[in-house]
Amino acid sequence: MENTLTVATILKPQGIRGEVKVKALCDSAEDLKGLKRVYIGGVEYGVLSVRAQGEVGYIALKGVFDRNAAELLRGKDIDALREDMPPLPDDRFYIADLTGCAVVTSSGEDIGEVISVTPARTDIYTLQTPKGELSFAAAEGVIEEVDIPNKKITVNKKRFKEVSV
């Protein structure tokens, strides 16, 4: 497991005082409110304030005082230490922990390895398989078990075939 998590992407400067508009890569921009420090390109920034509106947030960073400084951060990812993030409910996982997991059926058949997860109302998992890339929606009944310590995700074969492309 990684020590840092990518929690947002900077979309653009917001206003003239150095605030940035971000797209939250967690469940909600509300999850960013507890952060006291973040990392952008390996540089630590203190967090002065966070306003949240659904998936979008507005963050004021220490040392970013005007629109010109904020413009230099456009398009960059914001990372946070894992321990600074709020605890997850039992049935939720960080994308960083899912990436690299083997996906197998409940009968033990190996399907592939998770190479990315696209957050959506129903998350989309992309796998690398022997035949190329394959995607599936994490719809109800597809994923039976997620075992992060052993890097394994077990799926229901019948439901998996119904939702994979």
Image (cartoon, grey):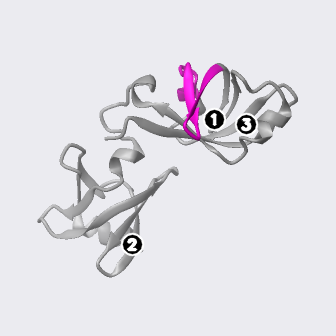
The numbered mark at residue 153 is none
Disc 2 secondary structure class: strand
For this orientation, the residue located farthest to the left is 107
Viewport quadrant of the C terminus: bottom left
Query: Which percent across, then down, holds residue 152?
Result: 22, 54
Viewer-nearest residue: 104 or 162? 104
- Residue range (magenta): 30-47
N-terminal of the pair, mark 1 or mark 2, is 1
Disc 1 secondary structure class: loop
**Image vertical order of residue 75 relative to residue 131, above or below:** above
Q: Is residue 77 left or right of residue 49?
A: left
Viewer-nearest residue: 122 or 112? 112
**Image vertical order of residue 9 relative to residue 14, above or below:** below
**Image vertical order of residue 94 relative to residue 129, above or below:** above
Return the residue at label 2. 134
- Spatial CA distance of label 1 from label 2 is 30 Å
Disc 3 secondary structure class: strand
- Spatial CA distance of label 3 from label 1 is 12 Å
Viewport quadrant of the N terminus: top left
Query: Which percent across, then down, holds residue 74?
Result: 73, 44
Mark 2 Cα-neighbour bin, 10 Å: few <14, some 14–19, many ≥20: some
Q: Is residue 81 left or right of residue 106?
A: right
Residue 144 magenta-drawn? no
Comparing marks 3 and 1, which lies closer to the viewer? 3
Return the residue at label 3. 21
User: In percent of the image, x 41 and y 47: which residue is there?
Assistant: 95
User: In percent of the image, x 84 and y 28: which residue is there?
Assistant: 66
The numbered mark at residue 54 is 1
Residue type indicated by callout 3: Lys
